[in-house]
Image (cartoon, coloured by chain):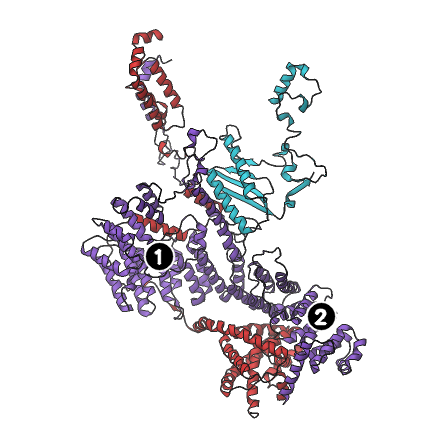
Chain colours: A purple, B cyan, C red
C-alpha cells in the first residue's frame, strides 16, 4: 500500500509546497482594486455581524399605530394605559427573572442529559455548539464556594459588587491578593461606593424605575473597604490615588478628596483629567458664596493647566454643572458663557450634558425669559449624530422641552427639538420611561396651548395612545383645546379615550369634558351631535356599570367604584341627550335615568343652571315624553328652584296644548279636581307647580319634601321683610 | 419501500393469503405506511357527533402542504439534515412544556419554527388569565426554554375568547 | 342698616353675576342669566334671535329688576362688612365693563358679518370669554373665598333645600379649588407676566474667555481601565432601551452572543482554528518522523491513524497532535517487547520481500 515510500519521506516538503501554492492562488479576497487585466473587483468591505441588521432596522422606523415591540401583538395583550404599559412589561421581565433564578439555583438540571452513560453524565452537557455563555448559569458565591483569583476578575469585569466583596473575603482579604487585582477591586469599590450597581440584563426594570434626580449628598462610606484597600497598597501608585480621589469626589466627600489631591500633588504623583473633572463637580461643597466658588473653580482649572492636563468635554460639563447648581444671576451666567468660549477655543464643543446645565442656569422658572435654546438647537442640528457621552445627557431633551413649554412657550422650538430627537437613533437619549412621559407631557401641552389646531391634532394622532398616554392634567389641557376649537367629534372620542386610559373615574375630568361638549354642541353637524349624545349617554351609564358589575371590561381598572358625578355634570348630560326629536330614541331612557339619579340625590350637589332642566322638560314634552318632562319639573320643584313655576306652566301648556293663561287659570283650581281629569304626567306637573308655588305638595308628597318646602316658604317670607 | 416488502412477502408465500387482502388482516410484517391514508392522523367520529376538531385536526395528514402546513418547521428532516433525533425530542419537549406551563390555556397545536438557532413557538391560547399573568408566563417560558435548549426562544401567541373559537367542525 | 342695603345689594349683584359667569356654581338664577354673556350663549341655542337682542340691550342698559324682585331671587344675599364690599365692587365693575364691551363688540362684528348673526356672535363670545375666565382665575378665587366665609357667618335666612345643598357643595368644592389655585397661581402668574415680557436672546458665542488653557498635546494623565469600563457601562445603562423591532432584538441577541453571527458561517465558534491551514489538518505524517520506524506494522498502523485523523473534522489540530503523541508514548513504553518480536526495526530486506 505504501510502496512508494519516497513520497512519504518527502511529506514535509510536499505540504510546504501545497501550502505556498494555496496561498498564492489567493484564498484571500483581493485587498486592492488594482489588477493587471483591467477587471477591478471592489475590495472586500469587512462587516460586523450586526451591520446588516442595523441597516435593516433603520428601514423599519416607528409605527405610531402599533404598540411598542416589547408588547405582544394581540388585541388582548396590547396595553393602552400607562398603568398597563408598566405592569405588562414588568410582568414579562418578572417571568424572565423567575426563569433565571431557576437556572441559577438548579444549574444541574440544565446541563445533564438523563440518557447519557454514567461516565459521561458527570461532564456538563450544553446543547449549543458553539457554547453560548449567556445561557450558562451564573455562579453563586457563598461561604462554601471555592474561589480563585479568576472569580474575582470575573466579578470585577461584570461589576458584581457584592459577589466580588464576598470573593475578596474568601480569598483572604487584603493580604493575599496581588496588587494589580487589588487596584482593580479598589476602582470598582470607589465607583460603586459599596452599593450594587443596576444590572444590565433587566432592561425593563431600568426603563421603568423612576430614577429620582441625583441628590448631591455626601454618601461616601468613610473607613469602608475602599479606604482599607488603599491603606494596604504599598507603594501607593498614581492609579490608587486617582481611584480613591475619583471615588470620594463622585460621592461628594469633597474635603477628603481635596486633601488627598493636595497630598498627591505635593508628592509629585501624576493625576488625571478625570480626577480634576470630578473635583470640579464638588467645588460647591468646599466654598460658600458665588464669588468664592467662582474663584475656586478658576483656581482648579489653572492648576490643571499647570499640571499639563488636557481638559476634555467632561471638564466642560463638570464646570457647568457646578455653576448651574450655585443658583442664578447675571454674574454666574456670564461666567458660564466664558467657560463655554474658553473650551470652544480649545476645540471642545459642549455636549448635551453641558447644554442641559446651561438651560438650567439660564431658564429659571421666575427669571426673565431667556432664549438660549435656539442657539443650542442651531448648534445641535448641525451635528451629524448626537453621541451620548455621559449619563446626564439624557436630561437634555426633557429639560429643553420643558423650557419650550413653560419658559419660552414656543411651539416652533418644540417642533424643532422633537425633530432632533427623532433623527437617527437619537431617541435613545430620551432616558427612561419617566423622562419620556414628562417629555411628551411638555410637548403635548405646548402643542395644545401654542400650536395651530391642525398641528395639535396631528401630534395627538401620532402620539396618543401608543407612544404616550396623556396624564389627567394633560388630558384636561387637551379637552380645553378641543373645546376652544369646537371639535365636537374629537370631544366625543375623548370620552372613549378616557375610558381606555383608565382615567374615566376622575370626576373632575369627566365634568370638564361634559362642559366642553355642552359648549360646543350647538355648532356641530347632526352626525357629530349624535356621536356626542352617544358619548354623553355612555358617561352616565358608565358610572352605573361600574357600580353594578365588575364586568368583562378589565376588572382591575374598575376595582374602585366610580365616584358620584356632580349634578352639573348630570344636567349637562341631560341637556345633550334631550336634544332629540324622535320619541323612540334611546336617549330618552338615559334622560329619565339621569333625572332619577338627580331626584334620588345620587349626584353630588344640585345643578347650578336649573334653566337647562326646564328646557329639558320642554323638549321632552315636545317629543311626547310626558313622563320625562314631569320628572324634570318635579325635580325642580322639589329642590325649590324658582324656575319650577315657569317651567311647570310652560310644560303644562305644551302638554295640554292650551295657551298659558288658560293653564294659569286652571292651576288656580283645587288639585283634587284635576286629579281625575288629567293625564298622570300632567297631574304630576300640576303637583310640582303647587309645590313650587306654595311649598305644600299634595297628599302623596313625602315628609322630607314637606319639610324642605316649608323651609323655602319661611325663606321667602323672611326675605320679604 | 414497505409496500414493496409486503408484496414481496406475499409473492414468496402465497399460501399466507388466506383472507382477502386487507391492511389489517394480512400484514404479517406490520408497518404503518399502508395504514396511513386510512387510520393514522385521523379522528374517529363520535357517537353523538359532538367531538370538536380544530382546523388542523379536521384535515388528515395527506392534506399537509395542500390545506394545512407542518407543525414543526426545521431543516433537520430534509435530506442530509443534522440533529434529526434531537430536533424531534426537543420539539416534543417544547410541546409538553407549553401545554404544562400554559395549563389548560393552549387550544391549538403548538407550532415550532426554527431559523438559524432561533426557535419560534406559536400557539393559540384562551383568555382565561389576566394579561399580566400572561406576560409573566410569556417571559418565564421564553427564558426557561431558552436556557434549556441553549438558543433564543420567542413565543408568538394569539388569544381567543374561548375554545369554541378554534373549533372548525364537530364529528 | 337698611339704608345701606341698596348700595351693597347692587354690588353684590355684580359679584353674583361674575360668579355665575364663571362655571356658575353660585346662585345664578334665571333673571341673572339674562345679564350673563355665557348663559346667553347657551340660551341662544334654543331661543330666538330677538332674545339675543334683548339680552344685548339689557347688557348695555342698567338692570331693570326692582330691588324687591331682586331680593326674591337672590335670597342668600346677606350683609357683609363694608371693607369687602368696597374691594369687590371695584374689581367687579372693571370686569363687568370688559365683558360689556366685549359683548357689544361681538354683536357688532356679528352684524357686520351678516349671515347667521346669532351663531357668529355666540362663537366669538365663547372664545373670548373662555380666555378671560382663564386669565382671571386668581381674582375670582379670592372672591369665592370671601363668599364662603360670609355665608358661614350669616346663616340667618332659611334657605330651601336646594340652596342649602348647593351652598354646602360650593363650600366643599371651592376649598380644594382654592388650594389648588393658590398652588397654581405661582405657575400661572409668571406665565402671564412673561407674556408681556420680551424674550432675551442669549448667544453662546461670546468673545470673552477665561484664558486659562492653551491648546497643547493631549495629556489626560493616569488612566484607570476598570473605572473607564464602569463609566461606559453606566452610559449604556442610561441610554439602552428595549428593542423597538425584530432587527433590534436580533442585534441585542447578537451582542449578548445568544444568536449565531451573521453572515451564518459553519465554522462559528472555531475561531482558534481560523489561522490554521488546512494542510496541517490533512498531512499529519510529518508528526511520525523522528520516532516511528520507517517500515513495518507499526508504521503501517500509524499511517492508518493519520489517515483517520486527517478525515476527522471535529478535532482541533492540537487534539490530533496529542492523539498521535499518545501512540508515540505507548509504543515507546512497549519498545522492548516490540523489539523482541521484531516489529520495531524491520530491515529493508524483509520489507522488499513483503512488497
Q: Residues within 10 Å of mark 1 (few under 14, many from 20)?
A: many
Give the labeled residue for mark 1: A351
Q: Residue furthest left?
A: A267
Between C14 and A627, the residue placed more toward the observer is A627
Q: Position of residue A675 (x, y in %)?
A: 79, 76
Element at badge 1?
A: loop
- Evaluate whether residue A477 shows in this view: yes
| Rendered-image quadrant of the N terminus of chain A | top left
Q: Position of residue A457 (x, y in %)?
A: 54, 61
Which labelled disc corresponds to residue A457? none
Q: Position of residue C278 (x, y in %)?
A: 36, 27
- Evaluate whether residue A50 shows in this view: no
Which labelled disc corresponds to residue A628? 2
Which of marks 1 and 2 precedes in the sequence?
A: 1
Q: Residues within 10 Å of mark 2 (few under 14, many from 20)?
A: many
Residue C317: name its quadrant. Answer: top left
Residue at 29% x, 9% y is C347
Element at badge 2?
A: helix
Tell me the CA gap for discs 2 and 1.
68 Å
Q: Position of residue C77 (x, y in %)?
A: 58, 84
Position above or below: B51 against A287: above
Q: Chain of mark 2?
A: A
Residue at 23% x, 62% y is A299
Position above or below: B101 against C70: above
Between C57 and C337, the residue placed more toward the observer is C337
Amino acid at each position: 500500500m505504501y510502496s512508494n515510500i519516497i513520497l512519504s519521506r518527502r511529506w514535509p516538503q510536499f505540504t510546504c509546497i501545497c501550502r505556498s501554492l494555496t496561498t498564492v492562488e489567493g484564498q484571500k479576497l483581493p485587498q486592492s482594486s488594482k489588477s493587471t487585466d483591467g477587471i477591478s473587483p471592489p475590495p472586500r468591505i469587512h462587516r460586523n455581524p450586526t451591520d446588516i441588521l442595523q441597516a435593516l432596522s433603520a428601514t423599519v422606523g416607528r409605527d405610531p399605530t402599533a404598540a411598542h415591540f416589547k408588547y405582544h401583538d394581540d388585541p388582548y395583550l396590547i396595553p393602552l394605559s400607562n398603568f398597563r404599559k408598566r405592569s405588562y412589561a414588568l410582568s414579562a421581565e418578572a417571568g424572565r427573572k423567575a426563569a433565571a433564578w431557576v437556572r441559577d439555583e438548579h444549574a444541574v438540571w440544565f446541563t445533564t442529559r438523563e440518557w447519557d452513560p454514567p461516565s459521561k453524565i458527570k461532564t456538563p452537557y450544553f446543547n449549543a455548539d458553539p457554547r453560548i455563555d449567556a445561557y450558562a448559569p451564573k455562579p453563586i458565591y457563598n461561604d462554601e464556594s471555592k474561589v480563585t483569583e479568576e472569580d474575582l476578575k470575573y466579578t470585577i469585569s461584570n461589576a458584581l459588587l457584592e459577589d466580588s466583596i464576598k470573593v475578596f473575603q474568601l480569598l483572604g482579604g487584603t493580604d493575599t491578593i496581588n496588587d494589580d487585582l487589588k487596584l482593580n477591586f479598589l476602582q470598582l469599590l470607589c465607583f460603586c461606593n459599596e452599593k450594587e450597581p443596576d444590572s444590565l440584563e433587566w432592561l425593563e426594570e431600568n426603563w421603568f424605575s423612576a430614577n429620582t434626580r441625583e441628590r448631591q449628598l455626601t454618601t461616601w462610606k468613610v473607613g469602608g473597604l475602599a479606604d482599607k484597600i488603599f491603606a494596604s497598597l504599598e507603594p501607593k501608585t498614581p492609579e490608587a490615588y486617582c481611584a480613591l480621589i475619583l471615588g470620594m469626589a463622585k460621592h461628594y466627600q469633597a474635603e477628603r478628596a481635596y486633601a488627598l489631591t493636595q497630598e498627591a500633588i505635593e508628592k509629585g504623583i501624576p493625576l488625571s483629567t478625570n480626577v480634576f473633572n470630578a473635583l470640579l463637580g464638588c467645588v460647591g461643597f468646599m466654598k460658600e458664596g458665588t464669588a468664592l466658588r467662582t474663584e475656586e473653580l478658576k483656581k482648579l482649572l489653572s492648576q490643571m493647566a499647570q499640571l499639563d492636563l488636557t481638559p476634555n468635554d467632561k471638564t466642560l460639563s463638570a464646570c457647568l454643572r457646578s455653576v448651574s447648581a450655585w443658583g442664578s444671576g447675571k454674574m454666574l451666567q456670564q461666567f458660564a458663557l466664558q467657560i463655554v468660549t474658553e473650551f470652544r477655543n480649545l476645540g471642545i464643543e459642549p455636549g448635551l450634558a453641558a447644554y442641559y446645565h446651561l438651560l438650567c442656569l439660564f431658564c429659571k422658572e421666575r427669571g426673565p425669559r431667556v432664549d438660549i435654546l435656539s442657539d443650542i438647537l442651531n448648534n445641535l442640528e448641525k451635528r451629524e449624530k448626537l453621541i451620548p457621552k455621559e449619563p446626564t445627557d439624557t436630561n437634555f431633551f426633557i429639560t429643553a422641552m420643558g423650557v419650550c413649554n413653560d419658559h419660552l412657550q414656543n411651539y416652533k422650538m418644540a417642533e424643532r427639538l422633537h425633530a432632533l430627537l427623532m433623527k437617527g437613533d437619537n431617541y435613545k437619549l430620551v432616558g427612561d420611561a419617566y423622562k419620556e412621559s414628562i417629555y411628551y407631557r411638555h410637548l403635548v401641552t405646548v402643542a395644545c396651548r401654542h400650536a395651530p389646531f391642525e398641528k395639535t391634532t396631528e401630534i395627538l394622532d401620532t402620539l396618543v395612545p401608543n407612544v404616550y398616554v396623556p396624564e389627567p392634567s394633560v388630558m384636561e389641557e387637551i379637552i380645553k383645546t378641543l373645546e376652544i376649537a369646537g371639535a365636537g367629534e374629537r370631544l366625543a372620542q375623548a370620552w372613549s379615550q378616557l375610558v381606555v386610559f383608565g382615567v374615566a373615574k376622575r370626576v373632575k375630568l369627566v365634568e370638564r369634558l361634559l362642559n366642553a361638549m355642552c359648549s360646543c354642541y350647538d355648532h356641530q353637524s347632526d352626525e357629530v351631535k349624535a356621536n356626542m349624545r352617544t358619548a354623553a349617554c355612555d358617561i352616565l351609564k358608565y358610572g352605573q356599570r361600574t357600580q353594578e358589575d365588575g364586568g368583562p371590561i378589565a376588572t382591575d381598572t374598575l376595582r374602585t367604584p366610580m365616584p358620584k358625578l356632580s349634578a352639573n355634570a348630570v344636567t349637562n348630560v341631560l341637556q345633550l341627550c334631550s336634544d332629540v326629536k324622535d320619541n323612540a330614541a334611546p336617549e330618552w331612557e338615559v334622560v329619565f335615568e339621569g333625572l332619577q339619579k338627580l331626584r334620588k340625590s345620587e349626584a353630588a350637589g344640585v345643578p347650578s343652571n336649573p334653566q337647562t332642566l326646564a328646557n329639558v322638560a320642554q323638549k321632552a314634552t315636545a317629543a311626547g315624553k310626558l313622563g320625562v318632562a314631569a320628572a324634570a319639573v318635579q325635580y325642580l320643584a322639589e329642590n325649590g328652584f324658582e324656575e319650577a313655576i315657569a317651567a311647570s306652566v310652560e310644560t303644562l301648556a305644551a302638554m295640554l296644548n292650551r295657551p298659558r293663561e288658560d293653564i294659569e287659570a286652571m292651576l288656580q283650581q283645587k288639585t283634587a279636581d284635576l286629579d281625575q281629569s288629567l293625564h298622570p304626567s300632567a297631574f304630576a306637573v300640576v303637583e310640582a307647580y303647587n309645590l313650587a308655588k306654595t311649598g305644600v305638595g299634595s297628599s302623596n308628597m313625602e315628609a322630607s319634601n314637606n319639610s324642605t318646602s316649608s323651609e323655602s316658604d319661611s325663606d321667602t317670607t323672611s326675605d320679604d321683610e | 419501500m414497505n409496500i414493496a416488502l409486503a408484496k414481496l412477502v406475499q409473492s414468496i408465500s402465497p399460501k399466507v393469503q388466506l383472507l382477502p387482502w386487507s391492511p389489517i388482516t394480512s400484514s404479517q410484517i406490520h408497518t404503518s405506511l399502508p395504514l396511513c391514508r386510512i387510520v393514522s392522523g385521523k379522528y374517529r367520529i363520535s357517537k353523538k357527533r359532538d367531538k370538536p376538531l380544530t382546523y388542523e385536526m379536521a384535515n388528515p395528514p395527506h392534506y399537509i402542504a395542500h390545506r394545512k402546513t407542518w407543525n414543526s418547521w426545521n431543516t433537520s428532516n430534509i435530506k442530509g439534515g443534522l440533529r434529526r433525533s434531537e430536533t424531534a425530542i426537543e420539539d416534543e419537549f417544547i410541546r409538553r412544556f407549553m401545554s404544562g406551563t400554559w395549563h389548560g390555556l393552549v387550544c391549538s397545536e403548538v407550532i415550532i419554527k426554527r431559523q438559524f438557532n432561533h426557535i419560534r413557538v406559536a400557539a393559540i391560547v384562551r383568555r382565561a388569565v389576566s394579561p399580566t399573568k400572561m406576560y409573566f408566563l410569556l417571559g418565564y417560558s421564553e427564558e426557561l426554554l431558552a436556557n434549556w435548549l441553549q438558543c433564543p426562544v420567542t413565543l408568538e401567541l394569539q388569544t381567543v375568547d374561548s375554545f369554541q373559537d378554534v373549533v372548525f367542525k364537530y364529528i | 342698616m337698611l339704608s345701606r342695603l341698596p348700595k351693597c345689594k347692587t354690588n353684590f349683584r355684580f359679584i353674583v353675576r361674575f360668579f355665575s359667569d364663571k362655571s356658575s356654581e353660585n346662585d345664578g338664577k334665571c333673571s341673572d342669566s339674562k345679564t350673563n354673556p355665557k348663559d346667553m350663549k347657551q340660551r341662544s341655542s334654543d331661543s330666538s334671535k330677538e332674545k339675543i337682542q334683548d339680552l344685548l340691550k339689557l347688557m348695555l342698559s342698567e338692570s331693570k329688576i326692582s330691588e324687591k324682585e331682586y331680593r326674591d331671587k337672590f335670597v342668600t344675599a346677606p350683609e357683609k362688612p363694608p371693607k369687602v364690599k368696597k374691594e369687590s365692587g371695584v374689581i367687579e365693575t372693571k370686569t363687568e365693563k370688559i365683558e360689556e364691551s366685549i359683548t357689544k363688540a361681538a354683536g357688532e362684528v356679528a352684524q357686520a358679518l351678516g349671515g347667521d348673526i346669532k351663531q357668529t356672535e355666540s362663537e366669538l363670545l365663547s372664545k373670548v370669554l373662555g380666555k378671560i375666565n382663564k386669565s382671571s382665575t386668581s381674582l375670582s378665587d379670592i372672591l369665592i373665598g370671601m363668599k364662603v366665609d360670609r355665608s358661614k357667618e350669616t346663616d340667618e335666612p332659611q334657605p330651601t333645600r336646594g340652596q342649602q345643598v348647593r351652598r354646602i357643595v360650593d363650600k366643599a368644592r371651592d376649598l380644594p379649588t382654592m388650594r389648588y389655585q393658590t398652588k397654581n397661581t405661582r405657575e400661572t402668574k409668571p406665565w402671564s407676566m412673561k407674556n408681556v415680557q420680551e424674550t432675551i436672546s442669549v448667544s453662546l458665542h461670546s468673545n470673552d474667555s477665561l484664558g486659562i488653557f492653551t491648546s497643547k498635546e493631549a495629556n489626560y494623565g493616569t488612566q484607570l481601565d476598570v473605572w473607564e469600563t464602569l463609566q461606559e457601562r453606566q452610559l449604556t445603562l442610561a441610554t439602552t432601551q428595549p428593542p423597538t423591532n425584530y432587527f433590534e432584538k436580533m442585534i441585542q441577541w447578537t451582542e449578548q452572543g445568544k444568536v449565531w453571527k451573521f453572515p451564518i458561517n459553519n465554522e462559528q465558534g472555531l475561531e482558534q482554528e481560523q489561522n490554521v491551514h488546512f494542510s496541517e489538518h490533512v498531512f499529519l505524517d510529518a508528526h511520525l518522523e523522528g520516532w516511528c520506524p520507517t517500515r513495518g506494522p507499526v508504521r503501517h498502523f500509524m499511517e492508518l491513524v493519520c489517515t483517520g485523523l486527517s478525515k476527522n473534522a471535529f478535532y482541533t489540530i492540537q487534539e490530533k497532535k496529542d492523539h498521535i503523541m499518545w501512540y508515540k508514548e505507548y509504543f515507546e513504553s512497549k519498545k522492548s517487547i516490540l523489539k523482541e518480536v521484531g516489529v520495531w526495526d524491520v530491515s529493508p530486506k524483509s520489507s522488499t520481500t513483503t512488497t
